[in-house]
Image: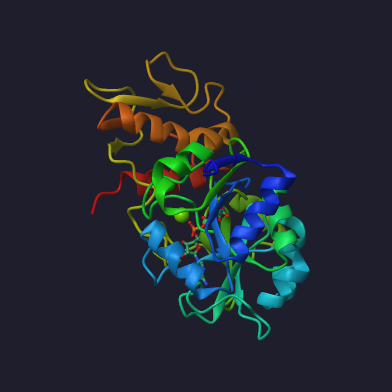
Amino acid sequence: MTALIVPVQSDTLAHAAEILGRGGLVAIPTETVYGLACDAANPEAVARLYAAKGRPHFNPLIAHVAGQDMAREEGVLSEQAAAIAQAFWPGPLTLVLPRAETGTVCDLARAGLDSIAIRCPRHPAAHNLIAAFGRPLVAPSANRSGHVSPTLAQHVADDLADRIDLILDGGPCTSGIESTIVSFTGESPMLLRKGGVETSVLKAVLHNDLSIPSDGAIIAPGQLKSHYAPNAALRLNAAAPEEGEAWLGFGPDSHEGYNLSLKGDLAEAAANLFAMLRTLDTRSDRIAVAPIPEEGLGEAINDRLTRAAHRD
Ligand code: TXA
Ligand code: MG
């Protein structure tokens, strides 16, 4: 019996590739969050992956590639799409593209759509594994569907231990928030999910040609109003904790509890967000969260907090 969580090394990467080749499920570190990977071309493996996460089948997966060549096998890159791939890959950006005729990603992974979501991760473990595997791996965040995304190998084990074959431990995810998703299937590029690449930076590369749906609109199948949800109730934009509430601060304060970034750094806050939500969730059933400025990475942090706070 081998361990479920193993460090990233050449032998464990080879073992992971072998498991994936057999249709198994392997959790992998990426720079955003841990992903639950399987062979994108194998419908049985993809069906197991949906079942392990408890994910609805109408919610398509992101194909992770090793570079632009592999991406072009799967999706049709317009000039604009190629420009932002060039600017932000490898990195926390996902492109939704018209599917290419040469595409190998199975129907189930695309939820039957004619489009395909593609990302080229920067984390060396993810990159090396995909390159060794030789074709795309689909990898949704490695949490139970609807729960807080994992930024540590242990988070993956907490959610999925008995349902998957291996977890590659690459340490804490440095970016901590999922990739930004931009669709190139319509008239002009559209922002489907705020994430690790800031909207303003994206806009600059696209010469402002980016449509941004109004807040709360559900444009990606998986962007449900309630998502990233801890069990605890969240109170956002709080000035201070009330009796019985656990505290999640931002910037200098003297309240007892956790702080996303004492120095008010949004990148540090993004990296801490999901791990602190998971920890606070074990301490209290009510969490008060300080205001986060709606700028830079703060936009993606507020998006996740709003969904985490939403109760249907
Ligand atoms: O940072 C990330 O993107 C992480 C790491 C592991 O790479 N992955 C991730 O995957 O966040 P997931 O499955 O948790 O979120 C993927 C999102 C979902 O909201 C899904 O609906 C959307 O991408 N999506 C996938 N294919 C799509 C498509 N063809 N059109 C529109 N949205 C799509
Ligand atoms: Mg997810």
The structure residue drawn at horizontal position 68% and vertical position 78%, both measured from the top left corner, is 76
- In the displayed structure, 209 sits above or below 250; it is below
Hey, which residue is sitting farthest front in the picture? 1
The structure residue drawn at horizontal position 73% and vertical position 74%, both measured from the top left corner, is 72
- The x, y position of residue 291, in whole percent, is 41, 33
The structure residue drawn at horizontal position 64% and vertical position 59%, both measured from the top left corner, is 18
- The x, y position of residue 31, in whole percent, is 63, 45
In the picture, the quarter occupied by the C terminus is: bottom left
Q: Is residue 308 left or right of residue 128?
A: left
- In the displayed structure, 247 sits above or below 48; it is above
Residue 139 visible within the image: yes
Task: Work out whether residue 237 or residue 89 is closer to the camera in this orientation and state it.
Answer: 89
- The x, y position of residue 87, in whole percent, is 75, 57
Hey, which residue is sitting farthest bottom in the picture? 101
Q: Is residue 228 left or right of residue 91?
A: left
Residue 60 visible within the image: no
Task: Work out whether residue 97 or residue 200 is closer to the camera in this orientation and state it.
Answer: 97
- In the displayed structure, 155 sits above or below 28; it is above
- The x, y position of residue 186, in whole percent, is 56, 78
The structure residue drawn at horizontal position 73% and vertical position 70%, both measured from the top left corner, is 70
Q: Quadrant of residue 42?
A: bottom right
Task: Work out whether residue 130 or residue 79 is closer to the camera in this orientation and state it.
Answer: 130
Number of callouts: 0
Q: Is residue 254 left or right of residue 177?
A: left
- In the displayed structure, 267 sits above or below 250; it is below
